[in-house]
Amino acid sequence: MPVIDLHGVSLHYNDTDGDGPAVLFSHGLLWSGDMFADQISALRSRLRCVSYDHRGQGQSPPSPTPFDMETLYEDAVALIEKLALGPVHFVGLSMGGFIGMRLAARRPELVRSLVLIDTAADAEPLWNIPKYKLLALLARGLGYRALLAPIMKIMFAPAFLGDPARSVQRQKMADHLAALRDEPTRAALQAVISRQPIEPELSRISAPTLVLHGQDDKAIVESRARTMANQIRNAQFVLIPNAGHTSTVEEPAAINAALSKFLSQQIA
């Protein structure tokens, strides 16, 4: 995976290359661009697919300076411009969606279409903040492996967690979580829980928008996603059965079908 240097920070990214329009994938908190492996596999024959790891997550090194959600938005802008990708079809899950809404509202010339997955436009609900801070504190002392059970229940729906046929895949996701680095992960978590709401800017989004949401998402409940979709002009909303907060991994066939149909409409 190559590395790109952007205004003092290095980010790992993956680029399938090709001459087709670019799709930029932006992952959720705790994960990496690998969470879009099934979507990239389905699209790469006709589209240029680029995924990247946010600072301090995945294979990207820790941030050399403190950062917030606005910094991560600026990273996305710099990545698009340096790789000459724009305008892109932007696909963001959870934290990646927070970035995508900012990008589409503020730099519309860089966004051809917008796909928001398992995300919302409001600030982090107040009742979530102490829970997530406690998990981070416990992880600092015990390590993430000791907290796998509660984190997995936040990230995945019962259908995924209870399926015997998916034990190998569950173990792979659990191993990723267990290997998280403490300080970079806490920095990313702080950027997420301290973010400002983007709701006042949603009316400025003009790009065609698709909202995909896991029906069993516990981290961002369905009502928050529907409220966001209703505030974006002509946004389409698709509920993904049997999926939680990581629907690209949990229900890739459903995500791929909706994503492929939507992108085909934009490219036609």
Image: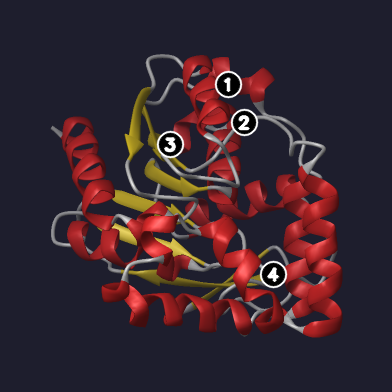
Residue 232 pos. (x, y %): 48, 19
Q: Is residue 175 visible?
A: yes
The answer to which of marks 1 and 2 sits earlier in the sequence is: 2
Amino acid marked by disc 4: Val
Other residues around mark 4 within 10 Å, as few (<14) / some (14–19) / many (≥20): some
Q: What residue is shown with label 2?
A: 121
Corner quadrant of residue 75 = bottom right
Q: Cα distance, mark 1 to mark 4? A: 28 Å
Q: Residue at x 43, y 57 (%)?
A: 158
Amino acid marked by disc 3: Val
Q: What is the quadrant of the N terminus in the image?
A: bottom left
Q: What residue is shown with label 4?
A: 9
Instruction: Name the element at disc 1.
Output: helix
Q: Cα distance, mark 2 to mark 4? A: 26 Å
Q: What residue is shown with label 3?
A: 111
Residue 22 pos. (x, y %): 31, 51
Q: What residue is shown with label 1?
A: 202
Q: Is residue 255 left or right of residue 79?
A: left
* Foreground of the two, 50 or 190: 190
Other residues around mark 2 within 10 Å, as few (<14) / some (14–19) / many (≥20): many
Q: Cα distance, mark 2 to mark 3? A: 18 Å
The answer to which of marks 2 and 3 sits earlier in the sequence is: 3
- Front label number (3 vs 1): 1
Q: Residue at x 58, y 41 (%)?
A: 220
* Foreground of the two, 74 or 248: 248
